[in-house]
Image (spheres, rainbow, N blue to C red):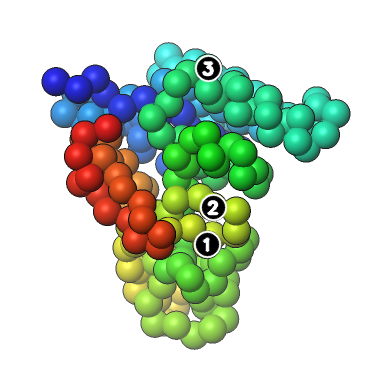
Amino acid sequence: MNSPARIVVLVSGAGTNLQALLDACTESSYGARVVAVGADRDDIEGLARADRAGVPTFVAKVGDYTSREHWDRALGDKVGAFEPDLVVSAGFMKLLSADFLERFLTLNTHPALCPAFPGMHGPRDALEHGVKVTGATLFVVDAGVDTGPIVAQVPVTVEEDDDVASLHERIKTAERAMLVDAVGRIARDGLAVEGRRVRIGAGPR
């Protein structure tokens, strides 16, 4: 049998998506394990979640390095030390360089149905635009902002009485389930990326 896929998760805040992955990884049939959690800030709940789960952590703060490029190389080296099969950006609020993305297959989520409503305010923008359905997207990170090849999407209906907070909360719930499902399938069955097309089930890693 293949060993579990090695996942490094990057966080900047509460780490609710991280927690969903940690919970999933307790099942041996899931096919993956979180081998490290990295952050760009100290003293955040995401790191505390990792500590409680007995998962190694590291911190790389931009201000501790002489340049953004220096930070990015250092982050890549910290991630690389854990030899991940996959990196998951789970609320990590820093852009990653092309060099980093060449080294590691990196996934991220966005609270909208890409390519609609990219950027920091997906739920707000969806409400303002008056759409009836929005959702969440899991994608392979590229050099753009929420522009990478799409791995999975889940729809979320916009209710008449929604405000940004209520809509975003339902999106986050759907997003966590989508992330856990897709990462598990990738861990067990592999991933192929050909241009804009992504296929899960490309064979074992």
Q: Is any part of residue 34 visible from this angle? A: no
Callout 2: 10 Å neighbours few (<14), some, many (20+)? many
The residue shown at (80%, 25%) is: 64
Q: SS class of the residue under badge 1?
A: loop
Instruction: Give the percent coordinates (x, y) of residue 186.
Output: 28, 41
Amino acid type indicated by mark 1: Thr
Amino acid type indicated by mark 2: Asp
Callout 1: 10 Å neighbours few (<14), some, many (20+)? some
Question: Residue 161, relative to residue 105: is it above or below?
Answer: below
Question: Residue 43, relative to residue 165: is it above or below?
Answer: above
Instruction: Give the percent coordinates (x, y) of residue 114.
Output: 46, 68
Q: SS class of the residue under badge 2?
A: loop
The residue shown at (64%, 28%) is: 75
Give the CA separation, mark 1 to mark 3: 28 Å
Q: Mark 1 = which residue?
A: 147
The residue shown at (40%, 62%) is: 196
Instruction: Give the percent coordinates (x, y) of residue 94.
Output: 66, 44
Q: Mark 2 = which residue?
A: 142
Splitting the image into 4 quarters, where does residue 135 fall? Answer: bottom left
Residue 156: which disc? none
* Relative to 97, 105 lies left or right: left
Which callout, 3 or 2, points at the residue further toward the start of the chain?
A: 3
Q: Check the image and name the residue furthest to the bottom.
A: 130
The one nearer the camera, 153 or 70, is 70
Give the CA separation, mark 1 to mark 2: 7 Å
Splitting the image into 4 quarters, where does residue 30 fall? Answer: top left
Q: Mark 3 = which residue?
A: 81
Amino acid type indicated by mark 3: Ala
